[in-house]
Amino acid sequence: MTAQTDTQGSVTTVYKVSGMSCGHCEGAVSGEIAEIAGVGSVQAVASTGEVTVVSETPLDDADVRAAVDEAGFELVGRV
């Protein structure tokens, strides 16, 4: 799946992150990604490894990778 433009003009992208195992992990990843300019919301789910990001415009994968790395996890790619 690639980034999808919603009717409100926002973009929803789902990423796969490895290494998350609990709510603390979800919070760490969400917190780092939320700091990227233009991000409106982030939902991380440890059980699936999926992180759903809603942003104003498509995000640069390098920025998302850096944020996930900063949280101590690995960005596998887009779902």
Image (tube, rainbow, N blue to C red):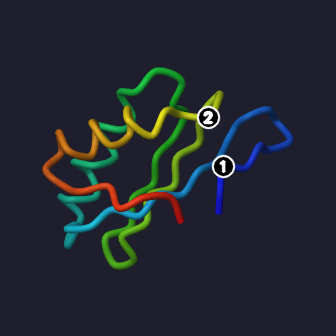
Quadrant of the rendered image containing residue 51: bottom left
Query: At numbered mark 1, what does the secondary structure look like: helix, strand or loop?
Result: loop
Query: At numbered mark 2, what does the secondary structure look like: helix, strand or loop?
Result: loop
Q: Where is residue 12 in the image (x, y as percent from the top left)?
A: 64, 48
Q: In this view, does 32 lie to the left or right of 53?
A: left
Quadrant of the rendered image containing residue 55: top right
- In the displayed image of the protein, which residue is found farthest to the right? 7
60 or 54, which is in the foreground? 60
Dot 2: few (<14), some (14–19), or many (≥20) neighbours within 10 Å? Answer: some
Q: Earlier in the sequence, mark 2 or mark 1?
A: 1
From the image, tell me which residue sits under label 1: 3
Check contact, mark 2 vs mark 1: CB within 8 A. Answer: yes
Quarter holding the N terminus is bottom right
Q: Residue at x 51, y 40 (%)?
A: 41
Q: Where is residue 18 in the image (x, y as percent from the top left)?
A: 26, 67
Distance (Cα) linking label 2 and label 1: 7 Å
The type of residue carrying mark 1 is Ala
Q: Which residue is drawn at 51% across and 55% down?
A: 52
From the image, tell me which residue sits under label 2: 58
Q: Residue at x 22, y 48 (%)?
A: 28
Q: Position of residue 69 (x, y in %)?
A: 20, 44
Q: Which residue is drawn at 43% across and 58% down?
A: 77
